[in-house]
Amino acid sequence: MGNYKYVSSCYLKLLINKVPYFTMDDDLLDFAYKYPFSQEARELVGRQRNEISTRYLESGGRNLENALSGRLKYSKISIGSVKLDYLMAYLYSRMLLSAVKRKDLIMEYAMAEAGRSVDAMLASEKEEMLRIAAELGLGINCAFDLKGANASDEFTIGFADYVNNTPRLPGFELVNQRLSSGVIRLNKGRMARVMEQAMLKEIMKGLPIKSTELPKQVIDFSKGLKFKSIAREEHRKGGGREGWIEKLLETPIADVRHRTVNLILAPYLVNTKGLDVEQASKRIIEYIERCKQIDPSTRINDRYIEYQCNYAKRKGLRPLSMERARELLGEHIDFDSK
C-alpha cells in the first residue's frame, strides 16, 4: 500500500479546502467503514466537502475514548451516513491523538482499531479477507485439499509474510506451524490474528502527526480531552486486552457457566486465540470440570461446548469486553480479581 500517511499536510487540505461531494457505491462505503485505513476509505474521505468542524472533533474524541477504554466495537449497520461519519471520526481521532502528544496511547489506539477491523473481517466472506490482505501487501490465498477442492476455512500465507506478522500469542511460534513449499497453512481464525498485526502496522503509519501539520482547531479542542486507558492497565496486570479471560480460565466459578461459555470462552479461544474447535472445546471442558468441584450441578455437557465453539467460529464472534461482562455477569463473577 506504500508509505501511506492517513493524515498528512496534503490530506488535511482536503478537509480545510472545499472539495466537491460525490455519490458513492454502497459496497465501497461498507468496505471502507470496516477498514478505515484502506485505499477505499482514503478515496471516500477525499471526496467529502468538509471543513474542520466541531461535530467531527467531538465524534473523533468519542471514538478515541472508546478505543482507549476497550469499548470500540464493530457494528453491522446499513445507514450510509453513519458509516461515513465513522470514517471521519477515524480521521479526526488520529489528529486528536497526535495533538494530545501521548505517544504511549498510540499503540493502544491502533490495536483497538485493528481489533475492530478483525471483528468485521471474521463476520464477512473469505473474498473480503483476501481483498484486504492484498491491500496490506500480504501473500494470502485460499487453501486446497488433496483433491483440489477449496478448503473453505483454511488459507495459506507466504513464509516471509508470516514471520513479519507473527502474533505474540501461544501456538503461533513458527515451529508449531504447517510449513510446505514456502507457505504456511492456517484456519480463518488464526489467519485473522496474523492479519491483525499487518493492520496494526498500517494504522500506525504517519502517527504521530507533526504539530505543524495539525489545524489550530484540532490542537485547541485536544486540550480539553482526558483519557483513562483501561487497556494499558490491563496490560500492566498481565495479558493485554483479553488477559482477564486467561485469568478467568484459571478461576472456577459456581454460576453463570452457560453464558460464560457462549459469550466469553468459546469466542475467545476460537477467534481471538485461533484454536481449532477441538482444542477450544477440550480447554473449556477441562475448565467446566474444575467448576464442578465448586458446584457439581450443571447441565453443560461436551456436546453443548462443542456446539458453542462451532457457532462462534461460524459467526466470527468476539468475546465480551471486560466492561460488558461486568455488567452482565458481575453479580456472579469477581471481575476485580481479574
Image (tube, rainbow, N blue to C red):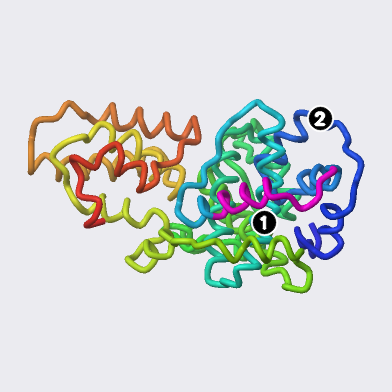
Number of residues whose C-alpha sits closer than 10 Å to that of mark 2, classed few (under 14), some (14–19) or many (20 or more)? few
Q: Residue at x 72, y 61 (%)?
A: 217
Task: Quote the CA–CA distance across marks 1 and 2.
Answer: 33 Å
Q: At which x and y percent is residue 56? A: 68, 48
Asked if residue 56 is among those painted magenta in the image, a careful observer would answer: yes
Q: Residue at x 66, y 50 (%)?
A: 90
Q: Quadrant of residue 201?
A: bottom right
Residue 263 sits above or below residue 228 on the image? above
Is residue 290 among what the camera can see?
A: yes
Number of residues whose C-alpha sits closer than 10 Å to that of mark 1, classed few (under 14), some (14–19) or many (20 or more)? some
Residue tagged by mark 1? 158
Residue 274, labelled with which disc?
A: none
Residue tagged by mark 2? 25
Mark 2: secondary structure: loop
* Upstream in sequence: badge 1 or badge 2: 2
Quadrant the N terminus occupies: bottom right
Quadrant the C terminus occupies: bottom left
Q: Quadrant of residue 207?
A: bottom right
Asked if residue 197 is among those painted magenta in the image, a careful observer would answer: no
Q: At which x and y percent is residue 279? A: 35, 44
Q: Residue at x 29, y 42 (%)?
A: 282
- Tell me the magenta residue range: 49-64
Q: Quadrant of residue 138?
A: bottom right
Mark 1: secondary structure: strand
Classify residue 74 as left or right of residue 210: left
Q: In the image, which is nearer the foreground, mark 1 or mark 2?
A: 2
Q: Main secondary structure of the magenta part?
A: helix
Q: At which x and y percent is residue 27? A: 75, 30
Of residue 57 and residue 107, the one placed in the foreground of this image is: 57
Three-letter code for the amino acid on which mark 2 is drawn: Asp
Tag 1 and tag 2, C-beta contact below 8 Å: no
